[in-house]
Structure formats: structure tokens, C-alpha cells
Image (cartoon, grey):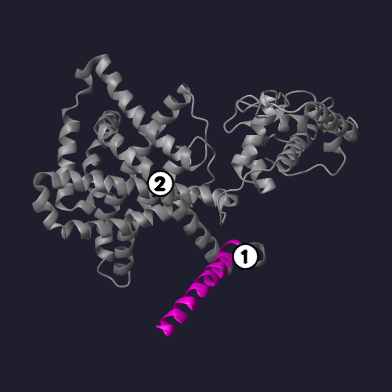
Amino acid sequence: MLYNNEMNEQNSRGWPAFSGNLNRLIWQADLTSMTRWRAWPVMALRMAVAISRDLAKGQLTLWAMSLVYTTLLGLVPLLAISFSILKGFGVHNQIEPMLLGLLEPLGPQGVEISERIIEFVDNVKVGVLGSVGFALLFYTVISLMQKIEGAFNTVWHVSQERSLGQRFRDYLSVLVIGPALIFAAVGISASIASLSIVGTLSAIEPLASLIGLAGKLIPFLMIAGAFSFMYAFIPNTKVTPQAALTGGLVAGLMWNVLGWGFASFVIGSTKYTAIYSTFATPIFFMIWLYVGWLILLIGANIGFYVQYPTYLRGEEPEQLSHRAGEKLALSLTTLIAQHHYSQQLPWSADALSRHLTIRNDMVQGVLDVLENAGLIKATADLPPTYLPARPFEVVTLDEVIAATRHGGDGKDLPDAGVAAPEGIDAILGEYETAAAAALGGKTVKELALQGTIDQEGS
């Protein structure tokens, strides 16, 4: 008994020590001082922990479940519109092989579901629907695309949605170009496989092994390419090629691995089939839809962390203190002024975040405060860039700090709504007057031009 108590006491002391060492290894290691082969595993561990934490919060799983419901409503209209558009290109016959490939983990049940979906699509006669019916059909598709964009924007911490015109333009591009690329890739791979020279080379080693490997690799690359295409064009922000490709490759790998696991589960699920009878097929279909959307969102999350490594933190994201907010506001206005006076391209929020190595949401929040105060203005570009709203020759540093201090008065409780004993308001007024006098009326332009003008582009 005494021995067990001693062992439990040692374990209770040992686990926190191990956890603390692991935490220091993952989150406190200086990656800049490491070689690449040592930094990559640490970065992978950080990303795995961050994604596990995001999954535990439940937001990704909720979006995946929401997209399953939306997909059930919008899948047939989506395929019907793509079928109608691509019929003129002569590639509409590739819809069924594509569905069979996507539903391959379901086994024979996937074949049955594909046949049913194609039957529904064939029954949709766009010319017979009329203008109202076609408008409802198109609205269902747009709602599906909007839901997907909302999920991606949440992952990428984007609060601004596309305008109606941008949605029509971008969604139509995805509806036409996306399926066309997939069908073209399927057609090219099928054409290459049917060449006589490929059959001849397949009988020669080691070419036969290489051709067999290519046959397995091409479907993976096609799925990864489709995911990368979605990550690059659907979020309402600028996604770097590295982030889109990394997320697409990892999601493609997960798709193949989990697809193999799900296929094994379906094969061994005879008991569930006996219990649910005819309901087993739609249940398995919905489960696979959920897994597929979750894979897609996890890949988007990976791409987000690749593009914004500043979000990789060991604890919950910290908030800006008042002093840090004032410092960030002065830094942002100084950088914007430096580019303005040196006639360089204006800064975007992403470029400012990368330059200052600060999370994008913190930078965007302070930029919004400065814009609401009338000190800077956002352009109509996508993503927007920032210019002076007033000449920085007359904007004082005290105005920037005051805008940061009072930036929440529009939506939070203003200081006038806080009851205080007599004399408190006078003391705060004296403090602000003394702070303004200490700055000596120095302007943003003077601060921007006092040192070496920053040469980094946006």
C-alpha cells in the first residue's frame, strides 16, 4: 500500500514536469536558431496541437455538420447546373465517374447513391423549369456556395463577406472552371491510360512499377489540386500559393487515408446494415459527407496556420493591453505614412501583420479603430489597402493615441456612462492635457520621416 502511494506521488510529480518540458519544447523553442530539419518537426507539432484545440472547441465540427445538411439540399441543383453548362463542352458524361470516385469509400452503396443522383440530375430539365424554377435552382446553388465561403471565412478569420456582384462573378467562375478542370484532368488521365504505348511500357520493368505508382499518384494529385483550388479562390481574402498547396496536399492525403479506413468500416458493418435496413445507405452517405467536409476544413485550417504562423500559440490567444494597442496604432500609422510619402504601394492588413509579426485580427482591429476615427481609409481593392484619410502633416500623435483609447465608444459603454466621484473627470482631463503637451504637437509625418524610411513592399 505504501509502495503504491509512493508510486502515485512520483507519477503526480513526474507528469507535470513532463508536460512542462513538452510545452517548452513545442511553444518556447526558437525556430530561427534551428536548422530546417529540426524546425519542421516542431512546427508540425505546434500545428497539430493548434488544430486539435480548434477541433475540441467544436466550431469546425459544427460547420461540417451544417455543410452536410446544405449539401443534401444543394447537391442535385449544383450538378444539374454544372451538367447544363458543361454539356456544350461534351464532358457532361464525366459526372458519373467523378461521383463514383468521390463515393468510392462507400463501396457498392456508393454506386447505388451515384446512380440515384444521376437519375435526379437527368430528371431536372432546366428548359422546362421556367424562369422562376431556374431562379430557385440557381438560388439553392448560390446558398450552398455562400455556406462554403462562410465556413472558409471563419477558418481564415475573415469577417467581411463578398458583395452581391462579387459573389455572382466568383461563384459562377468556380461553378464553370472548377468542374471543367476536374473533368479535363479525368479525361487526360483516361486518355493517357488508353494509349497503346502505355500498355507496351507496362510489360517492361521497372517502367511497369513506375506506371503503377503513377496510376495511384494521379488520383491523389487530382484531389489535392481540387482542394488547393478551393482554398485559393473561395475565402474572401488573399491566400498564398504555399498555404493553398500545403493545405491541399495534407487534405488529399487525409482523404485517401480516411477513405481507406471508412471503406473498411463499411465492409465490416453488416450488423449496422441489418439494423438500419434500407436506411443504412443514406446514413453511411451522410457520415462520409461529414468526414469529407471535416477533411476540407482541416486542410483549410492548416493552410491558415501556414500563412499566419503568428496564430500558433500554446495558450489561448492573448489580447492587446491599452499600452500595446497605442503602440500598435502608432506603428501602423507610421508605416502607412512611410509608404505614402515614399510613394510605395500602400499596406494591406496582411502585409502589416507579417511585417510586425502580430496576429492579423489584432492588426485589423486597430486599423478599424483608426479608420472609424477618420485618420486612415481603406481602398476598394481586394484585399483593401490603407491610405491617409487626412494629411498626416496635420494629424498629431496625440490624435492617434486618443483614437485608440476611445475607439470602442461606438459599441461599448462610453466613459460618460460611468458614474464617478467628484473630481475624477477633472483628473482624467488633466492627464490627457499633460500627455498631449508631452508629445509637443508632433505629427505623424514627423514621426514617419525621422528615421530611415521602411523599404518593405506590401
Is residue 4 in the magenta section? Answer: yes
Give the residue at x 70% y 30%: 370
Tell me, yes or no, whether the two marked residues, 1 and 2, touch with CB atoms within 8 Å.
no
Circle 1 SS class: loop
Give the residue at x 44% y 79%: 5
How far across and how far down the image is residue 349, in percent?
63, 38
Mark 2 — residue?
Answer: 58
Part of the protein shown in magenta: 1-28
Is residue 97 in the magenta section? Answer: no
The quarter of the displayed image where residue 267 is located: bottom left
In the image, taking residue 449 as reference, residue 322 lies left or right, namely left
How far across and how far down the image is residue 237, in percent?
53, 37
* Tag of residue 270: none
| Numbered label tally | 2
Compare residues 355 and 361 and report the one nearer the observer: 361
The image quadrant where one finds the N terminus is: bottom left
How far across and how far down the image is residue 262, in percent?
25, 56
Circle 2 SS class: loop
Query: Comparing marks 1 and 2, which lies closer to the viewer?
Result: 2
Q: Residues within 10 Å of mark 1 (few under 14, many from 20)?
A: some
Which numbered disc flags the more N-terminal residue, 1 or 2?
A: 1
Mark yes or no: residue 195 visible: no
* Tag of residue 29: 1
Tell me the kind of residue under disc 1.
Answer: Ala
Tell me the kind of residue under disc 2.
Answer: Gly
Give the residue at x 49% y 72%: 12
